[in-house]
Amino acid sequence: MVVRWDQKPPTNAGSGPVAIPTEQPPKESATVKPQITTPTPASTPAPQLPLATEKLAQDTPRPKYEPPPTTSIMAHAFSSSASALDKMTEKLRISLARTSAHSHERATMARAILVLCRSYAVRRSRGARKMALGLLDEIVDDDPNAETLATLLTAEGELHELGAEATASALARLVNMLENDETNAGVHASLCRSLTAHSLIQLVLHFPGTLEALEQDHESALTQAFALAEQAIIAAPEFADAHSVLGRVLLCSADPEAIAVAHQAFCRALTFDAEHDPAMAGIATIELNNGNAKQALVYADHIIKLGSGVPQAFHLRALVLSALNRYDDARRDIERALRQAPNAGLLHLDAARIALNLNDSRAAEIYEQNARILLGDDFENLKQMIFANGLTAKGSAI
């Protein structure tokens, strides 16, 4: 790998604190450490950021919910009930406790747990991933792949935080695995390469300053991401993540042919996992950019109904709702995404555009200042793209 991952990246591309224009500062989670302060000047009250009103919901009804034609029983079981995964986990732990060490029965259960823990059904939210890590810890002495998968899930959790330092940390963790040949074949090799490509794409789109600190430019990072995506498919041709990440790389291109191939990649991913969030987000992105906002909303709603806890899911739906002129609903979703990922400059730019559409110029100005600090030299180009052509969904899908 060419990536220099051993350097500590800067928190922001620029310098100085940035503010989120909300009446109450967002609460910090246990794993996310926001770098953005929320000052509220005494002389100028913070702007009100209302959520969607009942009248708006009545005036502009949502399209009928239409999930994809095929469903993953495993994913549906976990998403339909908040306690389903808890019950499944507890049953597995009890069964493990009743089996003797190194027995054939325990080895069989360990393999089943590995399959379960690498499924997207238990990777789409922080809580489910935490349970998966707990299960893997139970079988670490029974299967050497358990520790490898735990490291991969930890890196993916950092990527889902959508923060500059967390993304760089995930990249360091993954590159270390690649350099030490910890995953050289099969699904885990594919997942490792898929997540490494994902981390490079995320740095390109959301954290260009961190990418520069790692001595990478956009072109080289995307070239490496494309190569990693191809390697991921070779390692596990029927693994949905590999095809989805290839689609994500191709979405970074403005070439219509590349976008068409990206759509094919996302569709292939869904043939292997009918409820793979990144593939559905990719198709929603393409539908939105093609002017099919109502169809994009079907996918965006479905991803959130499945229990996705990543900020990109709410960012995507905010952009779709904006395209449908439902700006109050869009603001609600973009604010939720920003509370989860306060250092993602692209989200601040999209939030500024939404605020302008609501005639909230003060909030728009604050969001734009935040984006300028976070995006650094890339700010003007991204602003021109978003404000001239409308909001872009690329960052939400990738």
Image (tube, helix red, strand yellow):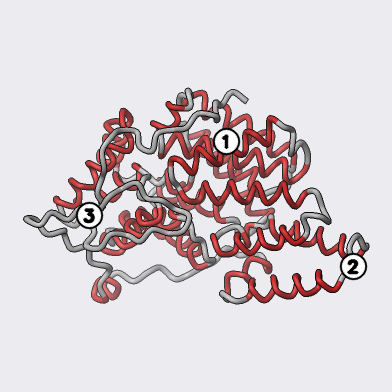
Q: Earlier in the sequence, mark 3 or mark 2?
A: 3
Q: Residues within 10 Å of mark 2 (few under 14, many from 20)?
A: few
Q: Nearer the viewer, residue 65 or 217?
A: 217
Determine which of the numbered discs, if any, sits on residue 21 in the image: 3
Q: Is residue 377 left or right of residue 139?
A: left
Residue under label 2: 100
Which residue is painted at 54% across and 26% down in the image? 4
Looking at the rendered structure, the secondary structure element under dot 2 is loop
- Label 1 sits on what residue type? Ala
Question: Disc 1, disc 3: CB below 8 Å?
Answer: no
Looking at the rendered structure, the secondary structure element under dot 1 is helix
- Single out the mark in the foreground, 1 or 3: 1
Label 3 and label 2: CA atoms lie apart by: 57 Å
Determine which of the numbered discs, if any, sits on residue 172 in the image: 1
Percent across and percent down for residue 46 are 16, 58
- Label 2 sits on what residue type? Ser
- Label 3 sits on what residue type? Pro
Q: Earlier in the sequence, mark 1 or mark 3?
A: 3
Percent across and percent down for residue 89 are 69, 70
Q: Earlier in the sequence, mark 1 or mark 2?
A: 2
Label 1 and label 2: CA atoms lie apart by: 37 Å
Q: Is residue 227 visible?
A: yes
Q: Nearer the viewer, residue 335 or 91?
A: 91
Looking at the rendered structure, the secondary structure element under dot 3 is loop
Q: Is residue 86 left or right of residue 347?
A: right
